[in-house]
Image (cartoon, grey):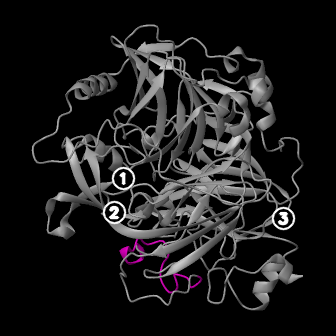
Amino acid sequence: MRRINQIALCAITLLIVLSLPSCQKATQRHQEVASEDILKEINTIKASLSSVKLKAGVDKPLIHLPFQNPEEISSNNGMLDTELAVKFTTSSIYNTVKDENISLYHRSYNGKLVGPTLRLKRGDSLFVNLMNQLPTLEGGGACDPFEPIHDGVDPNIIDSLRFNNTNLHTHGLHVSPMGHGDNVFVNLDPGCSFQNRIGIPDNHAPGTFWYHAHLHGSTAIQVSSGMGGAIIIEGGLDSQPEIEKMEEKIFIMQQIPYTPDTAAGGNPDRYAVKFIEGTTFGPGSWQDGIEASTGWRTTINGMVLPIIEMESEEAQRWRFIHAGVRETLNLKLVSLEENKINHEKLHVVAEDGIAYGYRNDVDSMTLQPGYRADILVQAAVNTSSEQDTLYLIDADSPVLDETDRTEYESEKVLAVIIVKPKTSKALARKLPSSEALAVYAPYPSLVNEPVTDSMQYVQFDIVPGDTTLFQINGEAFDHTRPPRQLGLNNVQEWTLTSSLGAHPFHIHVNHFQIQQHFKKVNDEWVEQPTSPIWKDTYFVPSSDSIIIKSIYKDFVGDFVLHCHILDHEDQGMMESVRIDKDNRITAYLRDRGISICGPGYKNDFDITELE
């Protein structure tokens, strides 16, 4: 992975946060000398903004286009019923090195670079008919979505014959993992369809979530092709008086690792997302792709360097979703004054879909793969008749892990913000205080809750060798192994560590609350300042130990935990988990000789059937 700094969390407890003036109003802007990388980037953009011209015989350049949210589908009368067609398509995308549009051949949802935003209310039902229209790579399936893909083969060997099988995961939703719910053990063959039926609980936390493909072995290649989209559960912060007035922008941030499409006869004008050993994924691959002639660039809703317009003093709500596979984003909103960078404050109000209950004003926000953040931004006062320009940048990130020191990515601009003089339009021009946000925190704290289940340990392991092994607690994913078992309504405490490399820990179905964060310094564990926020994905460096708590409510069944560097997950850094009630699921399957992901395992029974 790239250089990575500590996750940009509020570094103090809620009590302290609420007492600080920085959480009540915007603080003085921080200024620093701009790096050569960002100076070059901004000066290039300034020149291109005034000189982007249409070349003879080519399409309009797909750069510096007005920012657009993804296509949106909303629920109606308690139901969102839609279709997602998984298919190959050809899209146009701007290449900053070639300075022109290129044709990109890739797997997609509905033929787009980004899936549609699904907007629901609490208590709604989400029906998604997932239609696999990809070509068959081997044989042909019987369209049994519960037939395991890995029978008789090593599930952790990258095998391109599985790349066109798929399923759907609703990342961060607190919903059932069973049957036609958020079931990542579903295996949908090409030519087949599967009806996902997901009920959103009446008490679900409102917020920013997302969906993506999650079949073990094909997750990275499909997500890196653009197979992801936002899920918005309405309520909560949406009704806060200041936020309710704000324009909302959704940022699906993707890193698409395309290469020249030799399968198309070596056509230099067509590119494709495909797995090439040591090139598509792995340490240094993205770095090489953006620094060399490939011209990769983090896109926002499929766009390269979109233009966002704001007015003087205008406040907007930006929903950030890191839908990439492995690269860190260290987001800053800056302006350039001669050779100095001015940092505009990012006012963070939620992470991973869960409202803080306060406002955290920061200079930067670090997003690891799978992370989301709801951020309020406010343009500075512009009293002149001229427009000001801000830049959303992916900044350098200080190294936490020795294994990352060889990897460097130059700072890049991701979007350009044009701040125009104030008009008389009725726009949001005020930020809420921390006190005004306190009532929107959806979960009570687990800090003082006693642990009522067995202690849980997760250690991410990378074992170098002729074949590098990716493991959790010394074992790679095995669909026939009995899952880690946790009790319904029990409070669990987990310790998260890594023996080599840094890994974003993600677990399905329920969020967890950060308790403590320790760093090893000179063979001693030193506690780091942190805040007890709720997350569903959390970054674990090899020098650190993270303590979390969780409580599994409402749903039983089987699901997974894994590293959200998705090529790590595909190669074995995943584990099955079961939430059970009085061991009834385990006994039911044991008595019938059925193992998880084995023949006959449908994962579609209700706990009431076992009474």
Q: Amino acid at mark 2?
A: His
Compare residues 195 and 285 and report the one nearer the observer.
195
N-terminal of the two: label 1 or label 3? 1
Residue lying at 60% horizontally and 21% vertically, measured from the top left: 429
Q: Nearer the viewer, mark 2 or mark 3?
A: 2
Q: Is residue 160 magenta?
A: yes
Q: Amino acid at mark 3?
A: Leu
N-terminal of the two: label 2 or label 3? 2
Does the image show residue 368? no
Task: Name the residue beneath numbered marker 1.
Answer: 256
N-terminal of the two: label 1 or label 2? 2
Compare residues 371 and 420 and report the one nearer the observer.
420
Compare residues 38 and 577 and report the one nearer the observer.
38
Task: Name the residue beneath numbered marker 2.
Answer: 106
Q: Secondary structure under badge 1?
A: loop
Q: Percent x, y for residue 468?
A: 43, 63
Q: Percent x, y for residue 294?
A: 23, 48
Q: Are circles 1 and 2 on residues that touch, CB within 8 Å?
A: yes
Above/below status of 218 relative to 230: below
- Which stretch appears magenta? 146-163
Does the image show residue 520? yes
Task: Name the residue beneath numbered marker 3.
Answer: 488
In 3D space, how far apart are the residues under numbered discs 1 and 2 (Cα atoms)? 9 Å
Q: Secondary structure under badge 3?
A: loop
Above/below status of 189 relative to 411: below
